[in-house]
Amino acid sequence: MQDTQDKSAFDSAIRALEFEIANAGTHLTIDAAARQSYAMQIQAMANELRGQVASGRMTWAQAAQQAQEARNAIMEVIRGRSTPVGRAMAERLKREGKTLNELIARKTQQLHGVSADFNRLSATQKNAVYAEIVKSAGTSNPRVTATMRNLSRAGRGLLVVSIAISVYSVANAEDKASAARRELAVTGAGIGGGIAGGAVAGLACGPGAPVCVTVGAFVGGALAAFGVDFFW
């Protein structure tokens, strides 16, 4: 009797470890892919705008305006494809995109000093400011991109570990077909519950609260997975 209880407790601990690992791995993989897509899209956008200016079909001022609008639009689309945790982290780093006037003021100071006035610059100098805006619009934060690349590898590694635990559980089960279905159901519930839990926490905590959303994601994943496991 004691052996049966010990084995049941061990199996429950293994399943808890498995779905939390799968939950974390899925979050990291999705958010890293979203970041990579963001970096590629803004770079392609900036290259296209520079080509438009070089061909004479657009002025630098027009290109800067479109670059600012396009980058902010791409940012919102990509955040919509991220997990609630990834979105909260992104909003913590940058709540919303800069306006064109903010970008002009920043680039003017970077190129000509803190006391420079954009309105007093020559046409050539103004074009240089606009060109810098287009250039920066196509460049993602290298530190964040490198971090997300590393997290992507970590996420894939966690998914491999989760799969290995599932294989172990199925291999040691008496009814392997039923165990396999149970593993899929519990892990899927954990991942889905994690996404839902993070979304609910995001609404409760507000934007830019990654710690709160992360807790919500893991609690939601745990509750969903334990619920499916209990009623299986």
Image (spheres, grey):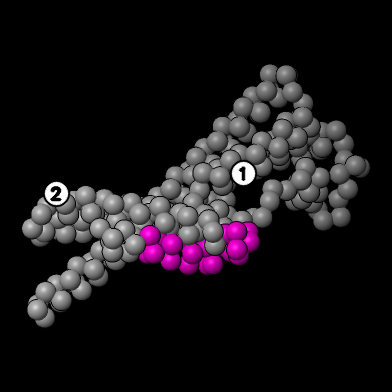
**Disc 1 residue type?**
Glu
Which residue corresponds to the image point at 69% horizontal and 48% vertical from the top-left?
97
Residue placed most toward the observer, 130 or 122: 130
* Type of the residue with mark 2: Ala
In front: 221, or 43?
Answer: 221
Residue 214 part of the magenta segment: yes
Identified at 25% across, 58% down, the residue is: 232
Q: Which residue is mark 2?
A: 177
Dot 1 corresponds to which residue? 76
For mark 1, give the secondary structure. Answer: helix
Q: Residue furthest bottom?
A: 2
- Examine the rendered structure and indicate whether residue 223 appears above or below residue 175: below
Q: Is residue 225 visible?
A: yes
Q: Can you see residue 107?
A: no
Q: Secondary structure at mark 2?
A: helix
Residue 12 appears left or right of 115: left
- The tag earlier along the polypeptide, 1 or 2, is 1
In the rendered structure, which segment of residues is drawn in magenta?
202-224
Q: Are marks 1 and 2 in contact (CB under 8 Å)?
A: no
